[in-house]
Each structure stands twice: as structure tokens, then as C-alpha cells.
Image (spheres, helix red, strand yellow):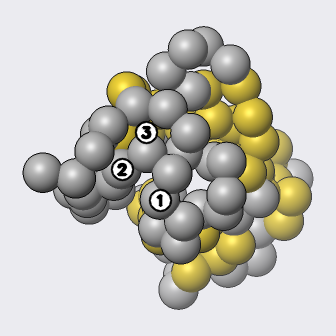
Amino acid sequence: MAELNIYVDDIGTIIEVDMGEDITAATDMEFHVQKPDGSKITWMPKIAGTQKLRYVTAEGDLNMAGDYRIQPELRLGSWWGHAKTVLFSVKKEHD
């Protein structure tokens, strides 16, 4: 994921994860997200291009500052599993 400036309560922020291979035939995509306080939520990304999963943040997604962890999960043919965990930070306020 590219370096972004992400802030608490941002809406419409594009979160992209490069899966490193062609995932155009993937199904059942999910981002399992751990927020800074340890709570967990699931985001439903869409395929972007041939190798990336993309999620656009909505109200309440980024409701606290700190480190967020995304564990991508998908089905690709007969393979079902997790990809490498991605970390990104959310800042408290704009500089």
C-alpha cells in the first residue's frame, strides 16, 4: 500500500492492497481490519486492475487514531486463504 496521509473520520479514502499476482478471478474478498484499540471489523473490497484489492472508507471506518492492520482474505480457484498483513496509520488531526 502506498504511503498516505490518513486522518480520523476521513471518508472516501482509497485503501489499496497489492496482492502480487493476478486476482481477476478471485471471489469472496474481505479485509479483516484490526483497529488501534484491538477491535475488529470486516471491509468488503473490490478488485482494482488485475492485482489489487480496493476499499473506499465510509463513515465510522476510521474513527480512531493509531495503527490499523488489514488481513486480506479471498478465494482464488480452489485456494482460500489469507495474504500478507498490511499496516497503515491514521493521524489524529490534519497538520
User: Which residue is outermost to the left?
Assistant: 95
Specify whether 58 is left or right of 5. right
Label 2 secondary element: loop
Looking at the image, tell me whether mark 3 or mark 2 is earlier in sequence order: 2
The answer to whether mark 2 and mark 1 are in CB contact below 8 A is yes
Which residue in the structure is indicated by mark 2?
Answer: 7
Give the number of the mark in front: 3 or 2.
2
Image location of residue 23, percent across then percent down:
63, 70
Q: Residues within 10 Å of mark 1 (few under 14, many from 20)?
A: some
10 Å crowding of disc 2: few (<14), some (14-19), many (20+):
many
Q: In the image, what residue type sits under mark 2? A: Tyr
User: Looking at the figure, which quarter contains the N terminus?
Assistant: bottom left
**Amino acid type of the residue that numbered disc 1 sits on in the rendered structure:** Asp
Q: Quadrant of the rendered structure where residue 26 is?
A: bottom right
Residue 4 x/y as whole percent = 25, 58
Circle number at residue 95: none
The CA distance from mark 1 to mark 3 is 19 Å
| As drawn, 52 above or below 19 | below
Residue 95 seen in this snapshot: yes
Residue picked out by circle 3: 86
Please tell me the numbered disc located at residue 10.
1
* Amino acid type for the residue under numbered disc 3: Val
Crowding near the residue tagged with mark 3, few <14, some 14–19, many ≥20 C-alpha atoms within 10 Å: some
